[in-house]
Image (tube, rainbow, N blue to C red):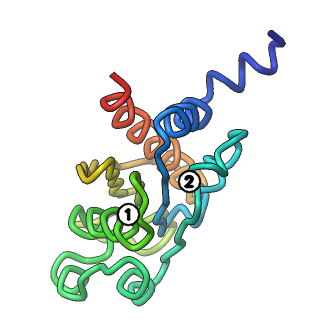
Amino acid sequence: MSSGRIIKESLVEYKIARILLHYGLTITTAESCTGGLVAGTLINAEGISASFKEGFITYSNEAKVRYLGVSEKTLEKQGAVSRECALEMAEGAAENTGADVAVAVTGIAGPDGGTEEKPVGLVYIACTVEGKTIVKRCHFGGDRNGVRHAAVKEALDLLYCQLLHIAR
C-alpha cells in the first residue's frame, strides 16, 4: 500500500465514506457559516457520489426556512445561531431529501456579527443519523477562516462518531 493511500484512509472523510457506502446510507449537508466546506470536504473521498446526493448552503434566514423548513418562530425566538436552528436544519435537510444522514452547521465566523450573548466563534453543529439527532455547541477562536475550518473538522468528527454507533 502506498503512503499516499495510508494518509487518505486516515482522513475522517474517507472513514465516513466507507461507513456510508458499506451500509448503503445517503447523506446531505446543510451549512450556513461554513458555506459548503463540509460538503466540499466530504466529496474528497472517492466513491462518495453513491451516498452524497445534495447539500444546502443556507446563509440567509429565508433560505433556512424555504429549503430546510426551519421555523420562523425558531429564528425569531432563538436566532439562526442556536441549538434549535441547527437541529431544525439537520432534520429538515434529511426530511426534504430523504437522506439517512444529515449534518448541519450554523454559527458566527466573524470578524463581525458577534454579541456578548453570541460571540464570534460560536457554532452549533447538528447531526441526524437514521432519525436520531444530536446537537453540539462549540466556541472556536481565530480568524474567520480558522473558525470555519475548525467547524468543518468538528462537524466531520461528530458525524463519524455518530456513524460508529450504527457500525457496531
Q: How far is disc 2 from disc 1 in space, using C-alphas?
A: 15 Å
- Which residue in the protein does label 1 denote? 94
115 vs 134: above or below: below
Q: Is residue 93 left or right of residue 17?
A: left
Question: Which residue occupies 71% across, 20% down?
Answer: 7
Q: Quadrant of residue 61?
A: bottom left
Quick check: can you spot residue 10? yes
Q: Nearer the viewer, mark 2 or mark 1?
A: 1
Rendering quarter of residue 77: bottom left
Q: Amino acid at mark 1?
A: Ala
Q: Which residue is mark 2?
A: 38
Which residue is nearer to you in this view: 163 or 151?
163
Residue under the image location 33 percent in, 32 percent down: 166
Q: Which residue is found at the position 72% from the left and 39% from the top?
A: 46
Count of numbered marks: 2
Q: Is residue 25 above or below residue 70?
A: above
Residue 47 sits in quarter? top right
* Extreme-front residue of the structure: 24
The residue closer to the viewer here, 63 or 107, is: 63
Element marked by disc 2? helix
Q: Residue at x 30, y 64 (%)?
A: 91
Q: Judge left or right: residue 131 versus residue 150.
A: left
Residue 107 visible in the current orientation: no
Q: Regarding mark 1 in the picture, which secondary structure is present there?
A: helix
Q: Along the horizontal axis of the image, is 17 left or right of 90?
A: right
Disc 2 residue type (three-letter): Val
Residue 164 location in percent, x, y?
Answer: 37, 28
Which mark sits nearer the N-terminus, 2 or 1? Answer: 2
Where's residue 124, x and y in %?
33, 57
Where residue 106 appears, x then y in whole percent?
A: 40, 65
Q: How dense is the environment of label 1, judged by Cα within 10 Å: few (below 14), some, or many (20 and up)?
A: many
